[in-house]
Image (spheres, grey):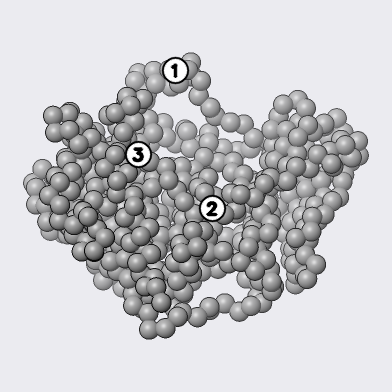
Amino acid sequence: MRDMRELYFEEGIPYLPKIFELVDRNRLSSTYGCFDRAFWHYRTSDFPSGMYQECVLPLAIVWGLRHLENPYFQQERIRELVWAGIDFARHSSRPDGSCDDYFPYERAAGAAAFSLYACTEACLLLNFEEPRFQSFFKKRASCLDYKGYQESGVLSNHKALIVLCLYNVFLLTQDLSFKARAEKRRDDLLSLQSEEGWFPEYEGCDPGYLSFTIDFLAKYFQKSKDEKVLEPLRKAIEFSSYFLHPDGTLGGEYGSRNTFHFLPHAYELMGNRVPQALEMADRFLETVEKKRRSYLEDDRLFCHYTYNFLQAYQDYTPRKEKTAVSQPEDFTKFFQEAGLLVRRSKPYHAVISSAKAGVAKIFKGDELCWCDSGFVGKAKNGIKFTSAVRGQNKFHFEGNRIVIEGSCYEHRELIFNPLTFVLFRLFLLVIGRFLPANVTRRLLQWKTILKARKKFPLRFKKVFSLKESAFVEYTLERLDPKLSIEELWIGSDATFIYVATSQSYQPGSLKPWINLKEVLGDLNSQKAVVFRREL
């Protein structure tokens, strides 16, 4: 039988040439060690994004990874580039230790935390004891821990990562104050955990990003042996196990941030402590073997997965026997706080969001047979609308019948043109650079993520029936007799808030949107229409 552990190595190692392509390797260059190719090579960006310096970590891992098919093992060039990458992160940071990500003077907590973890972990792996680096790490860690620097909105995965960063700085510097800060931030994070096991991401629960939070907490436990995180980790992993789909993907558009993340390292680390962990890791490995995992190949973000696969290979938990499926073939589980219902009724497996207007994924066997990411349309007056918005919905279920009712909302896009882009840059140069940390980012988050939406005069009702002859019945009702709709679809992978890591590729991306042009005539001439789709 094939050694499944090797799949982790085989998934991670092919990305190393891409990392070499991203980094400026010219020692005479003022941007030597910068991984933001758009900045140093193409000159299409006027500042370096700090997030890219995360790429030092995969390089540090492969330098010490003994494997017959690892050509990078103990290559001196690797150490040189890791050193250069950390040094560029140091001298390109703001005076307070922060860095930018999407725009100048942003001082982005996410980019600062991801790159700080990568740089500190690389130093631990390669035994770099450079005083300049340690001074920089202390400054950035203090910046991340400063209350005035806190992000708007609740991003639990960032909070967990900051705990890990603070602890890494303690390990490198032996400054006990950073250990104490890590424990304080740990307590703050754990206080956010729902009784159902999940940690919040902006407006609610996102199983994909929960995988990040689990990963960072598991890494923290691996280093600190802090037993205060064990029970929270167990609850989080148990919760996440309900959202690992029959096709091996996890999460999706029904989550608050629409993500499909699955980071296997944590599940290997917790394999001997949480029964569901190895089961989930094995299900994921089967997905990898079949080339059906989700893919996030963006230059800014692929690195998250690259080093996680390699870490999972290093910390692989030996299996004595094949892990057993822990969930019964027929069950219903409703997580009321999360607003997520999981219904398995052989051969169907469904995840339906009551919080997000009935966004749903339904599988028949291990194949995705129906993906409903909400109604998407445009009125003849040009107004665009969607139903996939967290709001006040009526929801109830009984046996195999699940019903949800709600409203549609207007959707407006924020897209730069040359004029608005120049005006935004002028604002940053003249005003934004002097504002407290995250003020500008908070305004953009409100506009693209947390904004209040205006109701659109169209209501819907969805009835899911998961019996042998399964179907979804839809009802649409116009609340304005003058309303005329020009386009109407049921989206298969539509997302309507800005999330950097959404819109990844996964098997459901191949599902077409359902064009509802055949019901438009009746909807525009009558008050309501009812139609059905067989599964």
Mark sitting on residue 506: 2
Q: Nearer the viewer, mark 2 or mark 1?
A: 2
The kind of residue on which mark 1 rests is: Leu
Q: Is residue 223 above or below residue 122?
A: below
Is the residue marked by circle 2 packed among few (<14), some (14-19), or many (20+) residues within 10 Å? some
Query: Is the C-beta separation of discs 3 and 2 under 8 Å?
Result: no
Q: Is residue 433 visible?
A: no
Q: Is residue 301 visible?
A: yes
Residue furthest to the bottom in view is 320
Question: To which quarter of the image does residue 340 belong?
Answer: bottom right
The disc placed on residue 108 is: 3
Q: Quadrant of the C terminus?
A: bottom right
- What element does badge 1 sit on? helix
Describe residue 364's horizontal placement relative to residue 211 as left or right. right
Q: Residue at x 14, y 33 (%)?
A: 27
Q: Earlier in the sequence, mark 3 or mark 2?
A: 3
Residue that appears at 24% across and 63% down? 68
Q: Quadrant of residue 489?
A: top right
Choose mark 3 or mark 2, whichever is in front. 2
Q: Earlier in the sequence, mark 1 or mark 3?
A: 3
Check the image and report above or below for 53 versus 364: above
> What is the number of the mark on residue 423?
1
